[in-house]
Amino acid sequence: MKAFWDDRYSNPEFVYGELPNEFLKAHLPNFQPGSILFPAEGEGRNAVFAAQLGWQVSAFDQSSEGQKKAQQLASKNQVQIDYQVGEFSELHYEKEQFDAIALIYAHFPADVKSEYHKKLSTYLKPGGILLFEAFSKQHLAYRAANERVGGPAEPGMLFSIDEIKADFPGYDYILLTEEVVELQEGPKHSGTGSVIRFIGRKS
């Protein structure tokens, strides 16, 4: 998968655009800035947005090409982000290190996604906020109708509300919903799709 993402991000164009995800843009400003982690951050659009709001931003991805694009975008917007490259299992964050974690289209392989979610949850402080948006299991029909909307073709990499409840126990739900949305996030997220949206506060 590293080769896939390096190839995708090597294009000079930002394949998901330079602007933040609309869900993140709408909700992150509602919380007091602190430390935030962006897993699978790609080209950095969401991390840069958070840094512009005054958050202390950490991010990671397996793609070194994604890191280059993120650093380019951060420089353009005159902010700093700590962006590491590597597999999640290779990186070492601290227990209860972050005030917030934002999982924005972080579609991990089916056999590890729940394990990764539970590990990420340990990095969040009690009272910390988790923001999540990713494609739902209903998204396959939308993807079949329009591949430009993007998202995994593998059903096991998609999400359901029940999976989110199982992966993130011990959270107070601020929002948990499945919605049909119109995405205009660069050439690889363009069109109608089905997503899960979750905001939770860790108990």
Image (cartoon, helix red, strand yellow):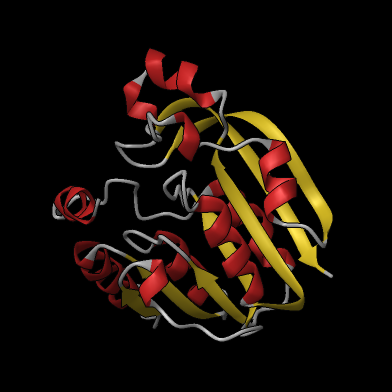
Q: Nearer the viewer, residue 120 or 73?
A: 120
Tell which residue pokes out farthest to the front in this image.
111
Residue 169 x, y percent position in the rendering: 78, 57
Give percent across and percent down for residue 17. Answer: 34, 49
Q: Position of residue 32 (x, y in %)?
A: 72, 77
Front-lying residue, 147 or 75: 147
Please indicate whether residue 75 sits to the left or right of residue 98 in the image: left
Q: Residue at x 39, y 35 (%)?
A: 152
Q: Is residue 128 above or below residue 41?
A: below
Name the image quarter holding residue 72.
bottom left
Residue at 14% from the left image edge and 55% from the top image edge: 10
State which quadrant residue 119 falls in: bottom right
Q: Is residue 75 left or right of residue 194?
A: left
Asked whether, in this view, residue 72 is left or right of residue 92, the answer is: left
Q: Quadrant of the C terminus?
A: bottom right
Relative to 72, residue 149 above or below = above
